[in-house]
Image (tube, coloured by chain):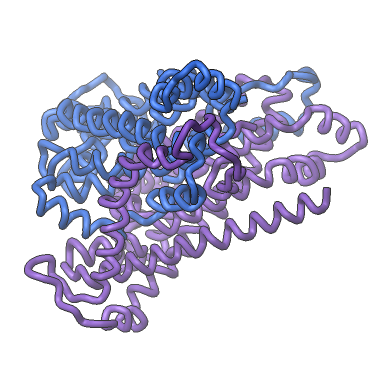
Chain colours: A blue, B purple
Amino acid sequence: MAATTAIVTAGKTRERPRGGMTKKRAIDWLLFIAVILGALVVMVPFYLILVNAFKSPVDYATSGPFALPQAIDFTGIQAFWERVNFPQKVWNSIFISGTVAVLAVVISLLNAFAIGIGRVRGRSWIVLLFLMANLLPQEALLYPLYYMFKSVGLYDSVWSVIIVFTVIQAAFGTYLLASVLGTFPKEVLEAASIDGATRWQILWRVVFPITRPTLSVLLIFFFIWTWNEFLIPLTFLPSNASQTVPVAISVLTGDRLMDVTTTAGAALLSIIPTIIFFLIFQRTLTRGITAGAVK
Amino acid sequence: MSVITRAEPGARTKLPPEQPSIPQRKGGTAGYWLYLLPGFVLLLVIVIIPLIFNIYLTFTEWRGVRTPEFIGLENWFKIFTDEDFWTSFTNSVWMVLAMVVIPTTIGLIVAALLFDVVGRKFGGKVGSFLRATYYLPQILPIAVAGIVIGWMFRPGATGSVNQMLAVFGIPAYDWLGQMPSALLVLMGVLVWVQLGYPIVVFMAALQRVDPELYEAAELDGANWFQRFSAITMSIIRPEIFVVTLTCTIAALKVFGPVYIITQGGPAGATLVPAYYAYTEFFTKRNIGYGATIATVLTVLVVVVSIIFIRVQNSMERKERAGL
């Protein structure tokens, strides 16, 4: 999804000064209620997931989708858990997304160091070239990559997906970090250089620690983006043992026999990791952005 | 505003033509190429070579086994008379409506309300909470969103939407099985998923507004709409631009929701280029033709990006000239 900027600006949640909070007119209340109603509409599918995940099929048949469960029942969740071997899918997703996030941040940093600080010749073209990897429809690479992975034996290996997303995410990271490093305080670099530090040392002992907040934001978003990716894992990871959470759940959609409570249980299990991850790192994101805008 | 926000696809990528930031002992900037090496090699193997291979495939007939057979421009001629191809690109217009026009418009209004009315009169915490609520569908894997939606719009009495309508005496309906409801449901889902993105971006942008501006306008008797158009709109114009660009590209590339919710159906009515290329690759095994569709899509994405960036640059220039 086109979540690129959101993500990066999402952290900035500073509240404005709350002047005039007392003066509330009727129109304010009306608008307030309208915004809340909108939020409730947005939440409807989440509500349906939550209440139906804990219903027994019988309960669902009698009370319908909107009612609260009569008794908490785990058969739907359990059915999905066992059917797809859920822990394995979560592990696949964590392994793929985590590895991609780390590798893509490292590559982004190396690229951005050469572009933003080294200012290599033709750098705006280089940035554009990298950015293309992020912009292109994945379909334009899909079959050649499919063919390549099949010929080198990486097809159906999580590494195929890891390599592809490392490149795609690093493309965005390079673009973003190159301009952040372009404004890196020169005095700091000069001081390090006078002290006899090599480029490699400057990168890891000076640039890396100072940009760490921005890097951690990138890390988190590479993780979430990769976690949610669909087309490439769907194509390159056909077997049960290597599938990711989104692919596993989409495979079940084709299965018309699956009852509603199992579907809801599946959906609930699949969003929990993302939501937990998001909640844990919301603070990091906030800090990351404020500090990431290298003064 | 953070540096990061400006560093968006729409923004300028040129860096000042200075010397490297670290004083050079010998060899100038050449040594920095070493740092680009890993990134470059990966880019070459995973993006550039496959892209060229894909373009080559557009001139071939290939079932994915044995060697591709060169057939010249046949695939390219076929595209012009292929009705499904044109349907898929017409549907891209609907996707742009659902992923760009509607979410950006509603997002603008909601962001302004959250910031200006809720944030100021009901407290920033309430505003942040509501913003997070609107953002939630964005972190949901589209595959998960898809199966829940598919289940809500199930045909017959088991679908929850039909059950809800039954309360009002409306008979059950096969939402995803016929037109135009299938396309409308798909579009509705996309609006629902996308809405949080502009809201979050616009609200971050609104942090730049000096609260005194609003207060002054209010004292001068400007109503909410006047303040919205005069202050809000002008301040967040760069963000509107970025959101429009990124969402347009995403709308042209949309695949997951179509694959999961409608499978391009009923009878190809919700076909989009990405899904069409996918089925040519893996269902019909017309690799050459699938590659051609993917190439057209790629060209379209690149052209749209270039137009956007040009327009933005010329707008920026005008703005600077005006100052």
In this rendered view, identify the residue nearer to me: B79 or B13. Answer: B13
**Residue B198, image x and y in percent?**
56, 42
**Residue A129, image x and y in percent?**
42, 52
Q: Which residue is drawn at 43% across and 18% down?
A: A205
Taking the image as shown, residue B31 lies to the left or right of residue B124, namely left
Quadrant where the N terminus of chain B is found in the figure? top right
Q: Which residue is drawn at 83% across and 32% down?
A: B213
**Residue A202, image x and y in percent?**
45, 23
**Residue A47, image x and y in percent?**
40, 31
Residue lying farthest front?
B26
For residue A56, which quarter of the picture?
A: top left
Q: Which residue is drawn at 11% across and 29% down?
A: A82
Is residue B119 at all visible to an observer of this figure?
yes
For residue A279, which quarter of the picture?
A: top left
Q: How many marks?
A: 0
Q: Is residue B23 above or below residue A136?
A: above
